[in-house]
Image (tube, coloured by chain):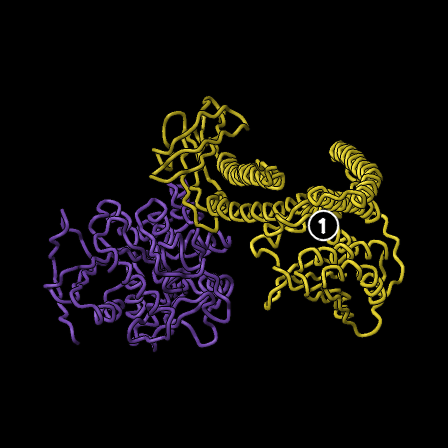
Amino acid sequence: MNDTVNVSGSLRARLSLTLIGSAAAIAVLLFFVVRTYAAQIAQSGQDNILEASVTSILDAATLRDGAVEVDFPYVAFSMLSTDADDRVFYAIWQEDTLLSGYELLPVADAPDGSEIVHVSAIFDGAPVRVATAARILVGANTRTRVTVSVAQTQDALAGTLNKISRNVGLIGAGFFTLSVLVASWATNTTIRPLERLTHSITRRGPKDLSPVARPVPMEMAPLVTSLNSFMARLDTSLKQSEDFIAEAAHRVRTPLATVRSHAEATLQRVEREDNRQALRSMVRAIDESSRAAGQLLDHAMITFRADHLETQSVDLVELVEDLVTRLAPVAEMKDIALTVISEGEVSVEADSILLQNALRNLVENALKYAPGESEITLEVFASPRPRVEVRDEGPGFPPDQIQGLAARFSRGENAKDTIGSGLGLTIAQDVATAHGGALTLTNLPEGGACVTFLL
Amino acid sequence: MRYIFALIVWLCPLMGTAEEWEDQNAFGPASAAKTLRVLSSTDTSLFAPVIEDFLRSRAGVAVEYFVTGTAQIDQVFRAAPDDFDVVISSAMDLQLKLVNDGYSVPVETLSQPDWAQWRNSLFAFTTEPATIVINRAAFAPDTVPQTRQELIAAMRARPEVFRGKVGTYDVRKSGLGYLFATQDARASETFWRLMEVMGGLDARLYCCSGEMIDDLVSGDLVVAYNVLGSYVAAREDVAETLEIVLPSDFPTTMMRTAFVSSRTEVEAEAAAFVRHLVEVQTGPRNPDVFPLPPLSAAVDGAGQAVISLGPALMTYLDPLKRKRFIKEWSSAVIQ
């Protein structure tokens, strides 16, 4: 199976980028809209003052003895004072004749009456805003048109606009910063249920295939539904295969026992040495098969019980001593001494049947690999955590395979000429894990293997 | 005096046509690499010390100082803006219009309050009130008029004393006189009544404050209206004879201003000169360097408000307005 997941893109990055990107776009848009709007307002402010100035000059225009007089008030220009000391230009025309002011000032065509025309222009190298209005003066027998233009440079306006731009820029930047914070918060909030689901599934025990019960957001419901149904199917097929193995092992063991008793009976009757030899091999093979079947059954049972532990107070020392008593005949056959070292009672909360099973597998393993006339030591410790160490004087574990040995049906390379299913360590490890402990395999410095069963 | 003080008369090598200068002086070494040409309305005697003070720390710079009337400054400079680097005048309105019309460059290194500068180009460096100057001989002590109204009353009471012996600016010839007259007219109708009374007494009209002071000293005048009091105060010989009256009804205070020509080829030196003027006038007072009053927002306890530098000053420069004002003034004064 391929362990690496095919990753393409990131939801978090996509969400963050979308949110931050749109915030940036909105901030920039905000900047330009507000700036344009402010520019219009500032410009209309200047236009209003120019308008008032033009009006006050135009109002002062009179016809006296057929000549135009424009005795405009001081305020006409004093109102044009600005912080930036903007330059002021003006022109007063009668028809097409300049009465006074700046002849070259660009003048817009203004309709007669109160309407004032504003234009932007360049005068004497500086951008100016020009307001122009015209009025018809009616005398005794004359009728003449007076046009007044007042222009002002835009230094103060530019200053105001710069200030506004700076402030709007700051507001935009502030808005953007806030949006980034909100975006990261929103992203986290959105991603969190997904992370929670991932976490809850990762944290599960290896055999926990129960459906996800925690509430999840609507959008994740289809995913969780599929996941649940997938896990249910997996659970069913797993249970079926376990059941099948248990059933098979059970069915194989009984006939094997019958075959063994027949073989033993035949062995009593057969005289020829080569026949007897063949029968003995047969009996040994049957023993191994039946042990393997037994271990398969044990394993199936452990798999079942691990999910439904029936814990009770168990004295680990008493349990180990019982086990030693039961296995003593087998050990004696190989001239192996079983020694128990302990310091009083070590009480643990555990499933005693599983513990027995696990420890028996460990000791049987040790018996299998230990040479004759050697010693197997079972030492029980109470602290820091309850544990049992099983030490033998055998060949030890192959150092390069020590990690994978507890896997199901895995056997050390040096075990090729020893009969076994490879389930013993797996059973012990499953039991330890089910109790929240661990199984550690080490080689002793003076030779021999050491298995630590930690609860 | 460390520097050669050379008086060069009738030498106008830079001018296309010989101008009728009131006065023309050169300061600093004749061999100087850079020559600063200053066009001014202020008498050389008042300005010489500050020019020498300016040159003291600058080797290789010379100053040519041209003096003419305020109205002529405007004409001369507009006709030949290339010929001058710094323009100094007491006619604020004409100066402001020159700056408005783009004849100046800003002095970026100089920062002055708003009321004392315009566009960072036109810099004020004195505050000088228009005053009534009287010859003490014509008035008994305690009867010296303190306001325009009192002056009108005094002239009406003793016309025989004042006939032919009252003087004021000829606003047609003097830029400063026109500025004072228009500002007075804006402030109060009293101005017109005063002009009418003075006109009725055959007022004598002058181009400059200096001549009015001379005639006051000689006794040809007993009272002069809108004279620069600062010129009187700067002359130590007249303190006994003349008395300066700051009209307490309403003040008219002018600021002498300077700007750097936009066509100058020695901009750094010209800017330094303007900066020097402003610094001398805003720093610790030293009458030996510059005898005219310093730059200050309030001239005295009476709170003399200065004519503000702003585009409004261009109002009375408008030909239509000027024509109308001079017509009115003439009908009052020249009867």
Asked if residue A443 lies left or right of residue B39, the reply is right
Q: Which residue is mark 1?
A: A426
Asked if residue B173 lies left or right of residue B193, the reply is left
Q: Amino acid at mark 1?
A: Thr
Residue A59 spot, x, y in % from top left: 52, 35
Q: Examine the rendered structure and indicate whether residue A434 appears above or below residue B302.
A: above
**Occupied quadrant, residue B44:** bottom left
Q: What is the number of callouts on the image?
A: 1
The chain identifier of the residue carrying mark 1 reads: A
Task: Please rate how many residues cluster around mark 1, counting C-alpha atoms within 10 Å: few if below 14, some from 14 to 19, many from 20.
Answer: many
> Do we see residue A214 in this rendering?
no
Residue A282 spot, x, y in % from top left: 73, 42
Residue B68 spot, x, y in % from top left: 24, 56
Q: Examine the rendered structure and indicate whether residue B264 appears above or below residue A249.
A: below
In this structure image, what is the colour of chain A?
yellow
Between B52 and A419, the one lying in front of the other is A419
Between A177 and B280, the one lying in front of the other is A177
**Occupied quadrant, residue B254:** bottom left
Between A314 and A273, the one lying in front of the other is A273
> Do we see residue B20 in this rendering?
yes
Secondary structure, mark 1, is helix
Residue B193 spot, x, y in % from top left: 47, 54
Asked if residue B202 lies left or right of residue A304, the reply is left
Q: Considering the image in quadrants, where does the C terminus of chain A appear?
A: bottom right
Asked if residue B251 lies left or right of residue B103, the reply is right
**Occupied quadrant, residue B325:** top left
Q: Which chain is purple?
A: B
Q: Considering the image in quadrants, where does the N terminus of chain A appear?
A: top right
- Residue drawn at x 48%, y 28% is A134
